[in-house]
Image (spheres, grey):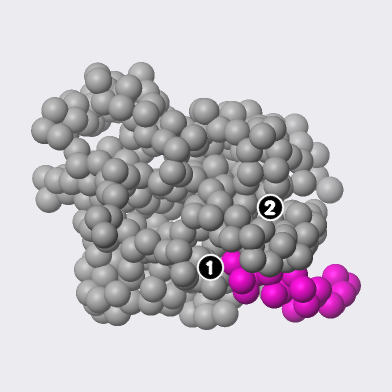
Amino acid sequence: MTVNRDWEHQLSDQQLSELDTALRAAQKSGLRLEQITRSTFPLGDFADELAGVAAELEDGRGFVLLRGLPLEDYSEEEAAIVFWGIGQYIGIPVPQNGGGDLLGHVRDERLQLKGQGYAHYSNEAQTYHTDSSDVVALMCLRAAREGGVSTIASSMAIHNEILASRPELLEPLYQPFAHHNRGEVDECSPPYHYSVIASYYAEKLSIRFGKTHIVDAYRDYPELGPLDRRALEAWELIEDLADKFHLDMDFRVGDIQLLNNYTVVHARTAYQDHEEMERRRHLLRLWLTLYNGRLLASNFGRNAGVLDAHGGRGGIRCRRDSRAESGSSPC
Ligand SMILES: [Fe+2]
C-alpha cells in the first residue's frame, strides 16, 4: 500500500530565501518578537502558499508538516522569529499559560510534575489529547536522544467509528463535563470549567479531548460527584481508536508541525534525553486562532466562543494576563 504524504511540504529554495529575507527585515525593524506582524515579516509568493496551509488546516485534512528549515544556519532567536513570522500568516497567537506566554518552549524541564498533567514539560508519554486553541504549531529545534515520537489521529474518523460501532457512546461526548484548569486561573475563577467534547455547530463537527483533565477534575473536586461510567467508557474508546488510526509524524529538526485541534488529536511517546539542558529535545510552540476558523458553540472549550481584543480565542486567560482587556474588574 502506498502511503499518501501530501501533508508533508518540503520547503523550496525560493521559500527558504523568502523566509530569510523576511527574517532580516524583522531583525532590522528592531521590534520585539511579539510585535512582529506580517507587515514586518514580509513574504512574497510564500504568503499565498501559507494561506493554502491555513485552508488545509481548516477545510482539508487538518494537519500539515513544513519540512526543511536549515536551523544550522540560524541562532535559536532567529529560528523563533522565523517560526513566529510563519505563524503570523496562519493566525493570531493566544496565551499558552497563566503567565500569558505566546511563544512556548516544550522540553523536559525536570519539574517533578509527574501526575499533575504537565507531561509536555517532562519526558513522559502524553496520551491522545487536543490543545486549547484552533491550531497548535510546533517547531523542532532539537530532537530527543531516543523516543519522543509525535503521533496524530483524525478525531473525525474516531467520531464516525463510534457512530458506526457504538452509537450509544456518542451521547456523553455531547454532554458538558468539568475539565481541570491545572491551577492556571486567577483566584476569582473556579478551578475547573465545563465543556462538551463533541460539538456540531454551523455545519462543522469539532472535537476537543483530554481525558486526564476530566478524570482529574472529578478526582480533585468531590462536589462534581462521581464520573459517569458510560462517559469514561466513551473516552477510553476514543483513546483506543486513536491508537488504531494513528499516524507517526516523523518530526525532525527544522520541521514545523501544524494541527487543527478540532479535527486531529495528538500524542507523544516517552523519550530518553541528554543530561545537559542545551542538548535536550526542544520544541517551540504557538497556539493560534485561525483567520479562517470555524464558528464555535459557546459550550465548546474554554474561552473558545469569545474573541479577545486581538481577535484571538481559546488559550489560557487569567486576569493577571497582561494582554487581558484593561478595565476588567477583580472578583
Ligand atoms: Fe498537546
Residue drawn at the location 29% of the way across and 74% of the way down: 147
Does 131 appear in magenta?
A: no
Which callout, 2 or 1, points to the residue nearer the camera? 1
Magenta part of the chain: 219-238
Instruction: Kindly identify the amino acid type of the residue bearing the numbered disc 2.
Output: Ala
Q: Is residue 277 above or below residue 6?
A: below
Q: Where residue 78 appears, x then y in whole percent?
A: 23, 41
Does 237 appear in magenta?
A: yes
Can you tell which quarter of the image residue 87 is in? top left
Instruction: For residue 263, say whether it is visible.
Output: yes
Q: Where residue 103 appears, x then y in whole percent?
A: 43, 47
Residue drawn at the location 62% of the way across and 52% of the way down: 207
Q: Please tell me the numbered disc located at residue 241.
A: 1
Q: Residues within 10 Å of mark 2 (few under 14, many from 20)?
A: many
Residue 269 located left or right of residue 205: left
Instruction: For residue 305, say whether it is visible.
Output: no
Residue 86 located left or right of residue 278: right
Tell me which numbered mark, 2 or 1, is placed earlier along the sequence: 2
Residue 246 located left or right of residue 146: right
Q: Where residue 91 appears, x then y in whole percent?
A: 47, 33
Instruction: Kindly identify the amino acid type of the residue bearing the numbered disc 1.
Output: Leu
Circle 2 residue: 198
Can you tell which quarter of the image residue 232 is in? bottom right
> Which is more toward the observer, 216 or 183?
216
> Which is more toward the observer, 322 or 312?
312
